[in-house]
Image (cartoon, rainbow, N blue to C red):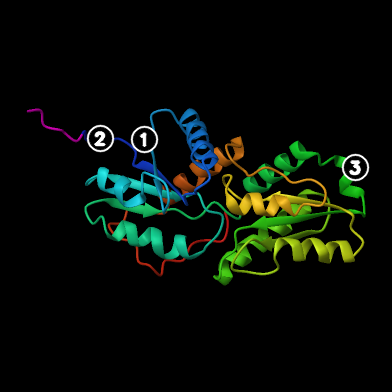
């Protein structure tokens, strides 16, 4: 009978990067996340990159953390703001793996690299430089939404950054759940203000029900989710490096941990 042995890292090895995805019933989502993590591996050869999901898809985060045993890891949420999952669910999973020396990085947003990815996705969908000076043009930044006011603040900040990147075009944050305004309400409000070329920017890491619902309300163009954009891979590594630079790895993460809004 063969025994299964757990391989251990050399003492000098960098902590594993554990990307924490939300999970989705949309079959495209796992493929998008896998492609994104392949970009991360290409940028940082030799770094151990693992994946854990909060729900719906395997491997679930507790399973990924358990497999790391008493090793070291930095958890990077593939989430775009400071909502319940970042503040409570992820730290709770870390607390349930007491042997693991772990640190939770800040969520991906807001950050200028996200704005770079959002701008490129809009351009791919048909946004043209001439739209930046067109008073008819406007953008709805469609996000998942959260009851946490800090999450909404993060989305509003990204909307402001994107508006600046687009040369002052109005960018209105809107949500597919848990917060207001909804995407169709934001579209109607912009139309009432005289904007007839209204694009929907998809502020989602991967395809899914919410991203599809937001795109369906686009009166003009709808951008694809952020997906495996190169800026996303760079941002994941930036958050990983930030967490390492913050100090020694902690054995537990309190559920009231506050994360920086940007950097």
Is residue 80 toward the left or the right of residue 175 in the image? left
- What's the residue at 60%, 50% (across, down)? 204
**Disc marking residue 37:** none
- Is the residue marked by circle 2 packed among few (<14), some (14-19), or many (20+) residues within 10 Å? some
Q: Is residue 221 above or below residue 259?
A: above
Question: Which SS class for mark 1?
Answer: loop
The answer for how far apart the CA atoms under marks 1 and 3 are is: 44 Å
* Mark closer to the chain start, 3 or 2: 2
* Residue 247 spot, x, y in % from top left: 37, 53
**Disc marking residue 130:** 3
Is residue 206 toward the left or the right of residue 240 in the image? right
* Residue range corresponding to the magenta coloring: 1-6
Q: Are marks 1 and 3 in contact (CB under 8 Å)?
A: no
Quadrant of the frame with the C terminus: bottom right
**Residue 143 in magenta stretch:** no
- What's the residue at 66%, 53% (across, down)? 213
Residue matched to label 1 = 48
Q: Are marks 1 and 2 in contact (CB under 8 Å)?
A: yes
* Mark closer to the chain start, 1 or 3: 1
Residue matched to label 2 = 9
- What's the residue at 40%, 49% (across, down)? 75
* Residue 238 spot, x, y in % from top left: 51, 44
* Mark closer to the chain start, 1 or 2: 2
* Residue 128 spot, x, y in % from top left: 85, 40
Question: Which SS class for mark 2?
Answer: loop
In this view of the protein, which residue sits in the foreground, 32 or 149? 32
The answer for how far apart the CA atoms under marks 3 and 2 are is: 53 Å
């Amino acid at each position: 009978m063969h025994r299964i042995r757990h391989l251990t890292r050399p003492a000098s090895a960098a902590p594993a990067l554990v990307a924490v995805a939300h999970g989705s019933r949309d079959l495209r989502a796992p493929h998008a996340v896998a492609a994104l993590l392949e970009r991360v591996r290409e940028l940082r050869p030799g770094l151990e990159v693992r994946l854990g999901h909060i729900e719906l898809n395997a491997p679930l985060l507790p399973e990924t953390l358990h497999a790391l045993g008493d090793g070291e890891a930095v958890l990077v949420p593939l989430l775009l703001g400071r909502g319940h999952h970042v503040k409570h669910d992820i730290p709770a999973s870390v607390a349930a793996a007491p042997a693991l020396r772990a640190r939770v990085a800040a969520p991906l947003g807001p950050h200028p690299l996200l704005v770079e990815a959002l701008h490129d996705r809009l351009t791919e969908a048909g946004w043209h430089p001439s739209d930046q000076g067109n008073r008819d043009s406007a953008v709805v930044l469609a996000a998942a939404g959260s009851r946490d006011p800090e999450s909404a603040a993060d989305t509003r900040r990204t909307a402001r950054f994107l508006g600046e990147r687009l040369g002052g075009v109005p960018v209105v944050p809107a949500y597919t759940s848990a917060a207001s305004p909804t995407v169709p309400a934001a579209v109607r409000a912009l139309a009432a203000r005289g904007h007839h070329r209204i694009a929907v920017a998809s502020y989602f890491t991967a395809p899914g029900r919410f991203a599809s619902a937001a795109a369906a309300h686009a009166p003009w163009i709808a951008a694809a989710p952020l997906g495996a954009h190169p800026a996303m891979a760079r941002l994941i590594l930036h958050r990983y490096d930030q967490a390492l630079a913050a100090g020694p790895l902690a054995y537990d993460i309190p559920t009231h941990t506050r994360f920086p809004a940007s950097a």
